[in-house]
Image (cartoon, helix red, strand yellow):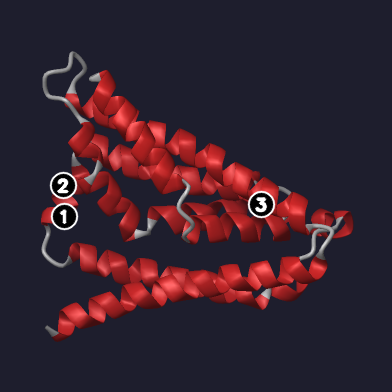
């Protein structure tokens, strides 16, 4: 691969992963509500692995070329974010972490994983990131085939996203597990962020339909 392009991509990937958004909100909420935040982070990363697989197989360009498909994906993703945000907001009163609560929540780890995968996997913004941004860092002159380069770049983003989301969840837990009131506020705020982003996505699609 072109080392300059790869380094530039690493900088972009780290910058995007460090930008607060729905992934941060879900990581923080899971870090406060669950015994382990690992299933949440693993789910988020799995969603981006799915995007990487689609990109490597050339399916993202095919999906983008189907009229209206991205719009319907956006509506589905927005509806999912609204549901997840409302669920998070409803659980804000029990956001303080305790060992007793953790025992009862351990059975929900698989559900947490699936929710995380849905958060990043159904999010059309993630699909557009892999579709529009990753190909700019692929070099046709490199020795590796283009699909392999795309896969390496996608998995590089997954790696840095996993590290950063883990740090976010761990930091939120360390700072807030002994502060129940603050933990509830942060969890409620995370739910509001998810609902807000879902509403914005739906609003964008409504404006396109009106025009």
Q: Residue furthest top?
A: 143
The quadrant holding residue 9 is top left
Above or below residue 91? Residue 163 is: above
Asked whether, in this view, residue 197 is left or right of residue 68, the answer is right
CA distance separating discs 1 and 2: 5 Å
Task: Classify mark 1: helix, strand or loop.
Answer: helix
For marks 1 and 3, give the one nearer the viewer: 1
Q: Is residue 201 above or below residue 108?
A: below
Determine the residue positioned at 37% across, 59% down: 123
Q: Nearer the viewer, residue 25 or 117?
A: 25
Circles 1 and 2, Cβ within 8 Å, touching? The answer is yes
Binning the other alpha carbons within 10 Å of mark 2 as few (below 14), some (14 to 19) or many (20 upward) gives some
Residue underneath mark 3: 109
Q: What secondary structure is marked by label 3?
A: helix
- Distance (Cα) linking label 2 and label 3: 34 Å
Quarter-of-image position of residue 80: bottom left
Residue drawn at the location 37% of the way across and 35% of the way down: 11
Q: Is residue 72 left or right of residue 118?
A: left
Left or right of 53 on screen, residue 166 = right
**Which mark's residue is nearer the viewer, 2 or 3?**
2
Instruction: From the image, tell me which residue sits under label 1.
Output: 64
Q: Residue at x 26, y 76 (%)?
A: 204
Q: Which mark is residue 55?
A: none
Residue 121, position as x, y percentages in the image: 40, 53
* Residue 64 position (above or below residue 165): below
- Res. 100 visible in picture: yes
């Amino acid at each position: 691969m072109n080392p300059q392009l790869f380094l530039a991509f690493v900088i972009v990937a780290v910058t995007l992963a460090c930008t607060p958004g729905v992934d941060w909100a879900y990581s923080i909420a899971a870090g406060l509500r669950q015994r382990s935040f690992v299933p949440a982070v693993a789910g988020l990363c799995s969603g981006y692995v799915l995007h990487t697989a689609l990109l490597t197989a050339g399916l993202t360009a095919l999906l983008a070329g189907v009229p209206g498909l991205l719009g319907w994906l956006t509506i589905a993703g927005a509806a999912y974010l609204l549901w997840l945000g409302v669920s998070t907001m409803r659980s804000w009163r029990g956001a303080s972490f305790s060992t007793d609560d953790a025992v009862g929540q351990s059975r929900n780890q698989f559900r947490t994983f699936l929710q995380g995968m849905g958060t990043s996997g159904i999010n059309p913004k993630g699909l557009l990131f892999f579709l529009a941004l990753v190909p700019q860092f692929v070099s046709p002159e490199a020795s590796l085939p283009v699909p392999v380069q795309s896969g390496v770049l996608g998995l590089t983003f997954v790696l840095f996203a996993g590290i950063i989301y883990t740090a976010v969840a761990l930091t939120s837990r360390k700072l807030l597990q002994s502060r129940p009131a603050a933990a509830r506020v942060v969890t409620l705020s995370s739910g509001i962020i998810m609902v807000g982003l879902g509403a914005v996505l739906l609003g964008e699609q409504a404006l396109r339909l009106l025009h």
